[in-house]
Amino acid sequence: MTTSSPGSPIAPYVHRRVPLDLGGRRLEFATCLDLFSSHQVDVGSRLLLRTMEPVLAERDTEASARVLDLGCGYGALGVALATMPAVASAHLVDRDALAVDFAAENARANGVEVTTSVSLGLAEVLRDTPEARYDLVASNLPGKAGAAVLSSMLLGALGVLAPGGLVAVVVIEPIRDLVASTLAREDLEVTLRRDTADYSVFHYRPAANASFPPPTDAFAAGAYDRGTLPFEDANEQPATITTVEGIPNYDRIDVIEDALTRRIPRIRAGQRVLVSNVAQGYLPAYVRSAQPEAHLILVDRDVLALRTARRALLALGAAEDRVETRVIGAWSEASAADAGANLVVGVLHEGGGAPAVVAEHVGLVATLAPGGRAVLAGGSTAITRLLAHKLPADCKASRTKHRGTSFLEVTRAP
Ligand SMILES: C[S@@+](CC[C@H](N)C(=O)[O-])C[C@H]1O[C@@H](n2cnc3c(N)ncnc32)[C@H](O)[C@@H]1O
């Protein structure tokens, strides 16, 4: 019943298909090694769904509930909820575009209609549909988001509820007390709490007569900020970037990115430089210091990384019209083929398995303008495999090595 279409961009990223049995209905989800809970539908998500079923069953038999799945991953919660008779519509969002691609494909493969979008917390949901209100906001909340981000998600969800709406979340045991204390407020009512050894579920809603306005943008308010990261730029000048929670290397320069900066060729004014996998923004900031007149195209699957890197560049004096951001989840040849990049630099994602690395490589090479060059960092095995991969006739590839890291250089003929 649930095969993902062979032409689907997620195909190279699929690790396996996992089942979810829901009161007689069997759903199946394509998962990815690089997404949450790739071996089975998470036990916490199942627990949350079990607590939702009676709540939804109490509603009119007519499908009327509008559902938001906040942090949808590959779609287990949102797609399952969308199959329930009381649910009229489901919108699934995640900060990770690869998760969103999987969620959309999993809905399609299970014959369920949902809408999906990339959103950092509720920011893009509110930007794109400021008036949208939900009867149910469901979330298996990230366990390592940090207190400020967690609070912005827990309380922000109340601000997008329709009258009579409910928020239902599941969290892992290490953050259960933090969640309980965040929800211990007079202006909200916890209507259900269920604890197991490893998880806690909370259902809650505004207290009678209380109202929560739509939340402000948590990123802009600094909820994600972690600290500052000093570095020496391409002109050997000291510079800093503001780092965020939830992305590695908030307090040190990543050694692979650092080695990559030593391989950046001369960039001329006006050239288009695509930086892939921007992480905390160090690589784009370094590139900009090498050539302030370059046009930067920042590409990442994580909208948090894109916002962090863009903010770093603007803080370092980059003009807004020289910084473009593109969120790309599953790569294909067509993902950014219009980029016309003179230079591509980036660290390959290897967590999704070998075919996913090939898909990303093919997509990145397709962004090169005539005469363009790509410098990509990766593990030795991955680069060996990519060297064996057939490139377009006008492209040539070579490899250099530095300690444990290999660098693949691809040039396109002028
Ligand atoms: C615990 S996983 C749950 C995934 C999925 N709902 C499930 O049940 O399998 C949390 C998800 O939230 C996403 N996430 C983390 N922080 C987020 C944020 N600030 N905004 C949106 N999504 C976020 C992660 O990418 C991840 O997919």
Image: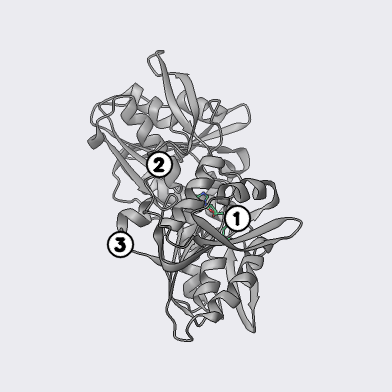
What residue is rendered at 42% in x and 61% in y? 209
Question: Residue 372's x, y, as percent?
Answer: 33, 37
Q: Which of marks 2 and 3 is nearer the N terminus?
A: 3
**Whole-number angstrom distance, CA of label 1 to CA of label 2:** 20 Å
Label 3 sits on what residue type?
Answer: Glu
**Whole-number angstrom distance, CA of label 1 to CA of label 3:** 30 Å
Please state the quadrant of the image where ligand 1 appears.
bottom right
Question: Residue 108's x, y, as percent?
Answer: 47, 74
Residue with the mark numbered 2: 306
Can residue 5 be seen in this snapshot?
no
- In this view, the residue in front, 381 or 360, is 360
Question: Residue 275's x, y, as percent?
Answer: 39, 37
What residue is rendered at 54% in x and 80% in y? 58
Ligand 1 neighbours mark 1 (CB distance < 8 Å): yes
Q: Report the disc number at residue 36.
A: 1
Q: Label 2's element?
A: helix
Q: Please tell me how crowded label 1 is: few (under 14), some (14-19), or many (20+) other residues with Cα within 10 Å.
A: some
Residue with the mark numbered 3: 131
Horizontal side of 91 relative to 315 (left or right) equals right
Question: Residue 353's x, y, as percent?
Answer: 60, 52
- In this view, the residue in front, 385 or 357, is 357
Residue 73's image quarter? bottom right
Label 2 sits on what residue type?
Answer: Leu
Q: Earlier in the sequence, mark 1 or mark 2?
A: 1
Q: Where's the N terminus, which quadrant?
A: bottom right
